[in-house]
Image: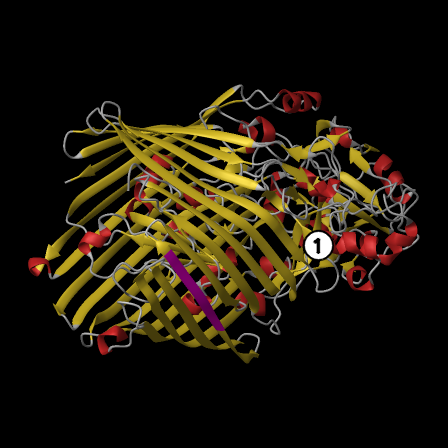
Amino acid sequence: MIGTALAALAAGLVPAGAQETLETVIVTGTHIQRPNLQAVSPVTTVDSAEIKLQGVAEIETNLNRLPQFTPDANENVNNGSGGVATVNLRNLGAGRNLALIDGQRMLPTEAMDLNFVPSAMVERVDVLTGGASAVYGSDAISGVVNFILNKHMNGVKIDAQYSISQHTNDLSPVRDAVDAKKYNKAPDTVWNGMKYSVTLAMGSDLANGRGNVSGYVGYRSNNSVLWGSRDYSSCPLVDTNGAYECLGSSQHAYGVFIPSTGPNADTAYANSKDGSKTWVTNDKSFNYNYAPLSYLQRPDRRVTAGAFGTFKVNDYIEAYANFMYMNDHTHAQIAPDAIWLGRQFQINCDNPLLSNQQKTALCGSTTSTAMAKSQVAFRMVAAPRYDDIRHEDFRFQFGLRGKLNEAFSYDVSALTARSVIPEFYSNVINQDKAALGLQVVSVGGVPTCLSVVNQENDTCVPVDVFSANGPSQKALNYIMTHKFSSATHNLTQYAVNVNGDLGTYGVTSPWANNGLAVALGYEHRTEKKVFTVDALGIADGGANAEGKITNDEVYIEADLPLIENKPFVKALTLNAGYRYTIYNAESALLSMKSPEKTFATYKVQAEYAPTDDIRFRAGFNKAVRAPNTSELFDAIGVSNYPTVDPCSGATPSKSLALCQLSGVTAAEYGHITPCPTDVCSQQTGGNPALKPEKAETITAGFVLTPTILENFQMSFDYYNIRVAGYIANLDANIVLTQCFDSQNPYYCGLVHRDHTSGGIIFGKNGYVIASNLNIGSMKTQGLDFTASYGFKTEASGDFNVSLVGTYLLSQVTEPLHGLGSYDCTGLFGPVCGQSTPTWRHSTRVTWNTPFSGVQLSLNWRYIGRVSLSSNTGLPFFNTSKTSNLNSHISDYNYFDLAGSVPIGENLILRAGVNNVLDKTAPAIDNGLLSKFGNGNSYPGVYDPLGRVLFVGVEANF
């Protein structure tokens, strides 16, 4: 390979040195082992040189810069983060692509975390497009991401890197909006987001080269970055008449009261800002800016270690083993917790913490002893909510391989992996304790909880939320608590594989030189999950969960050259594979067993090369994804999602007749409290009756390597992936829009309003039902284009130009079969989520200068323009949240500059700047964001921190 080409160009090409040192090359996408075998499925490769030039320590960020990927869980996900890193191939969901290490499953399916991969040890990453379940089993629907590690070392290698972000905050429209609310603006210039990483690796041959032992240990540290340090995330943004406005949360730090009884029912009050016990009319001037304390980049500390060993006893027995370990510790942080609106709290009218003015407003009298009801909100600004997340992963594999005879070889292995994920969520308000603390009477002139007087709860402390000064420290200590949960995931796999070259026995096409090659095998795989949650978590709607899945599989694959080295037919090859699976799932905790399922997957692929200059390829794959333990057996619970209830507020955007379809009563209409900060609630959970998803994928294209143009390579491929009966919770936004637009009783019946709190869709009793179902279908199709050209000059050195681009033809989702579909191509928004541009590419130009190994490289990342889905007026997108300000996101061009220089014989210094022009991420109305939206933007798609400078060094001894 010349320079540092981003891709090995979808041809399944093997790095230059590999064919010189190995007799048999294992190719991603097949179990067949044959010298010089090329993959029929399109494969894009990112090599170690490209990873170093990108200057990014996180392997998922390297992959997300490829146009085939839509960003998924990463370091820029904060609220709701599981602390993991995953990738989403073809925007079909992270669970529909399979992550491998050297062709074997990486970790338990539900604990997948690319933080586990030591990026400094990666030799290359193969990205295969299209179904691969016939080869690798369940989950390989959109494709496979295979991390090939450097496991055979002789010597010592040290790799270290440091990076820091720098950004100039000059987004005037947002700064003006912050000024208007008298919030704190982001600093004019910031330097933050430091990252450090170092890896030590070493290895040595044994017994005159019959064996090798290699190992590594690594450390990575990422510092946090707050929303408040960047303009676009410094406050919650909304589009108000075509201009940015800092909305903030209506559940603010002064105190909010909405009585549901008494003379002023449904009137929204706030405590006076001066600290007096006086209720005034609540308005937006009280709103709380919850943005500054949230993380735009989570802090993270990671330790990795591993060892690899092989020993060849003879041609018939070679033992191999590997062990990998990771300990990752990260935090998520969001705004302080609150006593939340959405619950009807009881407040006794003779409460001594109320002033006479407040008693009159709440109860209509200063002498009443009745029990009033009111929604209450009070933001406890003493400390932000803090989510402490740890991951400890272990992976061990042992196997034997070798020849059976001249035609056949074998590989027998056992693999086990374990992930332990404890999570500690602190500074949480116990809403039940708050409810007790609001019922207070005077005992000898001392405010005392009614529950203490009644001897129902002797620990209760009065909670005074009736002035802007807030509760006492003693009261805070009483109501503030923490939640703890822990998940353990286990994977066990036993595999037997036999490879054979039947050409040895004369099983060869009469028009070919090479014979039929086959691979057949058996795999037994068990995955188990145990999830536990403490009492407070259970009180908040959580529950313990447990489940186990067992797969027994047999497979066969064949590769048959039909014609070779004939006129107009340099090669014509047929490849086919078949896998049969027996699937069982059960939960001992629930005393429940899912019915046994059997399914088959297969592939048929062909390759035709008329000459050495061009190779055509096409394939059809039938793939599956079986439901995991969470989808089957997780308890029903309530979570939040961003949306707007069009039946809320004093002037609902939907008519009474339409709102009544969603459960609104005539009395509630015009009096429903809006979901706080455009965040409503949804009910999700497991479903033991789920069936496997089924997919069909088609790929077709060609690879051009013209002999007349040396060092030029190009590939062009069409892909078409359709998933039927996909497993998901029905999108709550779609439920609402379809209820109002189609008036379909199915959708309207999924809206469950909390009538005890005025019909709000928020909290434990108000939600949209969105449990797991085999609900509909997804289809995506597009064109992949890769090209690379390298040339030499006599005086100026060598040059290499490479490009990887994807043109998206369609991204269609049918939420329920027969009830319509929508296409997110070229869109973003509440339903479509992150930007789905029609065209994305990454182009790199590398100059290997004539100056003693000095290299310079420029990378151009392009993200095409996208439009707001809800502005289209199309069914499924027709929500009440539209925007002129965010009607589209313009195309984005990022330029990255990197270089390296050798220092002596053993050191290579590298440095670079990503996002050289310091381009700011787009500022998006907070109510338009969907999954993986954070800080008024999509920080996985667009560079969130601005300009990033890095320097690294590699030492080899």
Residue 458 pos. (x, y %): 65, 56
Q: Nearer the viewer, residue 341 or 68?
A: 68
In the image, taking residue 824 as reference, residue 526 lies left or right, namely left
Residue 24 pos. (x, y %): 23, 62
Residue 608 lies within the magenta run: yes
The answer to whether residue 155 is visible is yes
Q: Residue furthest front?
A: 567
Q: Residues within 10 Å of mark 1 (few under 14, many from 20)?
A: many
What secondary structure is marked by label 1?
helix
Q: Nearer the viewer, residue 438 or 258?
A: 258
Give the vertical position of 437 relative to 227 (above or below): below
Q: Quadrant of the C terminus?
A: top left
Q: Main secondary structure of the magenta part?
A: strand
Q: Quadrant of the N terminus?
A: top left
The answer to whether residue 453 is visible is no
Q: Name the image quarter holding residue 427.
A: top right
Residue drawn at the location 65% of the way across and 42% of the way down: 827
Residue 872 pos. (x, y %): 74, 42
Q: Amino acid at mark 1?
A: Ala
In the image, taking residue 732 as reference, residue 632 lies left or right, namely left
In the image, taking residue 625 as reference, residue 125 lies left or right, namely left
Q: Name the image quarter holding residue 688.
A: bottom right
Give the vertical position of 717 relative to 550 (above or below): above
Residue drawn at the location 46% of the way across and 53% of the way down: 701
Residue under circle 1? Answer: 732
Colouring chosen for the image of the structure: secondary structure
Residue drawn at the location 70% of the way across and 65% of the way down: 817
Residue 499 pos. (x, y %): 28, 72
**Magenta segment, which residues?**
601-609
